[in-house]
Image (cartoon, helix red, strand yellow):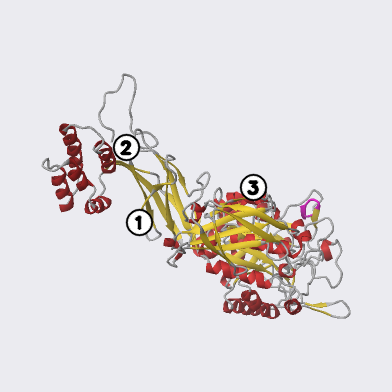
């Protein structure tokens, strides 16, 4: 309510304005246009922020009012992030999946304002008359009389006692019992509350995990002398699971497991013609089943086994503490039953033929894209049926192929429908596309997204990229930093040798809560098809036999390093957060420095967790430089030395804010340092 006042003629006063009596602006977390809820995950420490200010110099009391999915309310004091910015923040560990509601409450903190002024005016160096002092104390008494209970009454009586000295009366105002009472029953006015916001919280796997991709048909595949192949099966592929689990991975991602078409089947390295022994691309979905009928997205390739065999694979994965992610590729081979049953789901050219997929200069004659504009209801319902079918088999994670080639409305609809009945299901977007589309897919509901990480290799590129992930997009995009895929073998990996593989794995595993590798990474597979960023003899088009045992015997494997990285992630909860990444400095243009810190109240281990990563981005040389840290970002006091434990080599050093590092690309190109808190010097 607006108080009565003298209003100049012609000026209408209708209320406190659009912003309320105390402006509360720029609330976060939220998405750009607030069209969808911001995203979080169980275990994330979420910074709730708002810019709060008012006219004059009176102090403010700002609180976060947070409601969990059951409706239980908790209140959290918000403090200024930096003096003079009016940017208020409260960090909260989110512990339950579901829809959370929150808002910010701001009030004029009348008692804190009075106490601050009284401390200044009644300072011994100030010259005040007794009458001036009595007026100041009378104002304080008037505020305390608004409180309820014995503590307030006793304090008001003592504060108004003119028989006490001003110093004694002021001491009453600072009494700890009074402070506690005021904390429980604040003396405030002009309370203003922001609009309510929504935070969608997913299970932890929606943002946290270590992924390993492999083709089940290659695991156990055998080549005969005549060049023919016997495909690996779910049963033979299951034998690989213990080794994957031993490397510390949480999720096994399988490319499409469905029948593969024979029409326009591609040969090795995307050759236009396939030979009789070429298995084709698993992404060309739709082909003959064992009984000769055509199968599609709800069928299993007969060479891989039966539905019972797939369930066996799922059970073996679960026994090894692994989840299985299935590829959801919404496209068809010319042999897919949808081509004849629902020709309206495809784009037809002027000559009557169906348009195949193209990404110039690449051409995929073996794949027909779907058209969601001709029968949106029918096609959408069929895709939902397919997803629910695989959920019923026990799949709770889907890696979605090329989601940016389907309309955004469809993904919003599908992901919303699935979340209503299966909130545990996670969708990863393979969104290697333009930034607006990548962001919009995440905003519309994808729990995870591939990013441009593979192509961010220089120090400036990585600094900007990692900073943006932790800040600009963290309210809605959960990155999964894959170091390679069947389609992505960057020049950095092609020409960087084993050091490059260590560098990229270390950065991916420590910078993001989710990261992943495609099989063969641990064997340093680095030969590309000339003029491309794809592996030569790409596994998409052929079987690939790998001698894992020989690699272990000869020691030419990165598996122990990957195992150590995943162990470090499990041991250090700071690494399983995204928003806490902070970029620091070094004097070398090829040495990247960043840290992650988690306060003691959030680690569950009784103490804080701080990690410093120093990476030599030059896989061909030794780099020596000075590293410069803003130690306040690690919960440390500037100027004081501190101990660090190098988690790869098990070395221990005492560091300062600026310290020397030597990183040999041919031994250990990356330091992963754990700050040792509580050690005195």
Q: Which residue is mark 2?
A: 58
Q: Which label sits in the foreground, 2 or 3?
A: 2
Q: Which residue is mark 3?
A: 435
Task: Report the residue at 33% width, 30% height from top.
Answer: 14
Tell me: residue 207, above or below residue 23.
Answer: below
The quadrant in which the N terminus is found is: top left
Side of 520 where 278 appears, left or right: right
Side of 101 where 234 appears, left or right: right
- Is there a contact, CB below 8 Å, between mark 2 and mark 1? no
Q: Which residue is mark 1?
A: 74
SS at badge 3: helix
Q: Spatial distance from mark 2 to mark 3, Cα to Cα?
A: 43 Å
- Of 601 and 11, the residue lying toward us: 601
Q: Which label sits in the foreground, 2 or 1?
A: 2
Which numbered disc flags the more N-terminal residue, 1 or 3?
1
Q: Spatial distance from mark 2 to mark 1, Cα to Cα?
A: 26 Å
SS at badge 2: loop
Q: Please state the horizontal and vertical placement of residue 327, each as a whole percent of the image.
A: 66, 65
Q: Please state the horizontal and vertical placement of residue 573, each as a whole percent of the image.
A: 51, 64
Residue farthest along the right direction in this orientation: 226
Secondary structure mainly formed by the magenta segment: loop
Query: Label 2: how many residues lie within 10 Å, few (<14), some (14-19) or many (20+)?
Result: some
Side of 152 where 108 appears, left or right: right
Residue farthest along the left direction in this orientation: 163
């Amino acid at each position: 309510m607006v108080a009565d006042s003298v209003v100049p003629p012609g000026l209408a006063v209708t209320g406190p304005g659009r912003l309320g009596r105390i402006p509360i602006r720029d609330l976060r977390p939220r998405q750009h246009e607030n069209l969808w809820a911001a995203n979080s995950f169980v275990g994330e420490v979420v910074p709730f922020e708002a810019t709060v200010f008012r006219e004059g110099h009176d102090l403010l009391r700002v609180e976060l009012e947070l409601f969990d999915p059951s409706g239980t309310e908790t209140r959290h004091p918000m403090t200024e992030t930096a003096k003079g910015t009016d940017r208020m923040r409260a960090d909260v560990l989110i512990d339950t999946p579901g829809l959370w509601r929150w808002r910010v409450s701001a009030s004029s903190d009348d008692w804190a304002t009075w106490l601050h002024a009284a401390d200044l005016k009644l300072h011994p160096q100030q010259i005040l008359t007794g009458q001036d002092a009595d007026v100041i104390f009378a104002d304080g008494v008037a505020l305390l009389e608004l409180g309820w209970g014995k503590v307030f009454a006793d304090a008001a009586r003592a504060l108004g006692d003119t028989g006490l000295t001003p110093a004694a009366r002021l001491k009453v105002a600072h009494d700890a019992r009074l402070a506690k009472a005021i904390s429980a029953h604040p003396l405030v006015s002009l309370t203003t509350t922001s609009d309510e916001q929504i935070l969608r919280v997913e299970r932890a796997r929606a943002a946290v995990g270590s992924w390993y991709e492999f083709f089940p048909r290659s695991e156990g595949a055998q080549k005969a002398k005549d060049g023919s192949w016997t495909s690996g099966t779910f049963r033979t592929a299951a034998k690989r699971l213990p080794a994957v689990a031993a490397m510390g991975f949480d999720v096994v991602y399988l490319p499409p497991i469905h029948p593969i078409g024979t029409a326009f089947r591609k040969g090795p390295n995307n050759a236009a013609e396939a030979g009789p022994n070429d298995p084709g691309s698993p992404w060309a979905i739709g082909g003959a089943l064992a009984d000769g009928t055509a199968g599609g997205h709800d069928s299993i390739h007969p060479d891989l086994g039966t539905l019972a065999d797939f369930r066996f694979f799922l059970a073996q994965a679960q026994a090894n503490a692994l989840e299985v992610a299935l590829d959801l590729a919404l496209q068809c081979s010319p042999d897919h039953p949808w081509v004849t049953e629902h020709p309206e789901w495809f784009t037809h050219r002027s000559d009557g033929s169906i348009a195949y997929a193209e990404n110039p200069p690449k051409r995929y004659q073996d794949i027909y894209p779907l058209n969601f504009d001709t029968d949106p209801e029918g096609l959408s319902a069929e895709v939902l049926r397919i997803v629910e079918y695989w959920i019923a088999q026990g799949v709770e994670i889907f890696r979605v192929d090329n989601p940016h080639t389907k309309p955004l409305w469809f993904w919003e609809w599908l992901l919303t429908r699935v979340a209503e009945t299966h909130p545990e299901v996670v969708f990863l977007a393979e969104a290697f596309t333009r930034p607006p589309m990548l962001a919009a897919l995440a905003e519309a509901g994808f729990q995870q997204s591939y990013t441009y990480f593979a192509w961010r290799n220089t120090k400036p590129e990585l600094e900007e990229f990692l900073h943006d992930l932790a800040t600009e997009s963290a309210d809605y995009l959960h990155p999964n930093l894959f170091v390679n895929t069947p389609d992505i073998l960057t020049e950095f990996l092609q020409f960087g040798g084993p050091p490059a593989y260590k560098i990229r794995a270390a950065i991916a595993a420590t910078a993001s809560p989710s990261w992943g590798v495609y099989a063969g990474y641990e064997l340093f597979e680095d030969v590309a098809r000339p003029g491309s960023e794809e592996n030569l003899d790409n596994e998409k088009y052929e079987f690939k036999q790998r001698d894992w045992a020989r690699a272990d015997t000869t020691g030419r494997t990165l598996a122990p390093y990957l195992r150590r990285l995943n162990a470090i992630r499990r041991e250090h909860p700071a690494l399983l957060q995204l928003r806490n990444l902070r970029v620091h400095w070094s004097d070398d243009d090829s040495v990247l420095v960043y840290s992650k810190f988690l306060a003691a109240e959030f680690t569950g281990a009784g103490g804080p967790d701080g990690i410093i990563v120093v990476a030599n981005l030059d896989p061909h040389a030794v780099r020596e430089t000075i590293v410069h840290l803003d130690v306040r970002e690690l919960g440390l006091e500037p100027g004081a030395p501190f101990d660090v434990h190098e988690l790869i080599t098990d070395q221990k050093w005492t560091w300062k804010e600026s310290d020397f590092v030597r990183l040999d690309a041919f031994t250990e190109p990356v330091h992963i340092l754990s700050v040792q808190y509580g050690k005195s010097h």
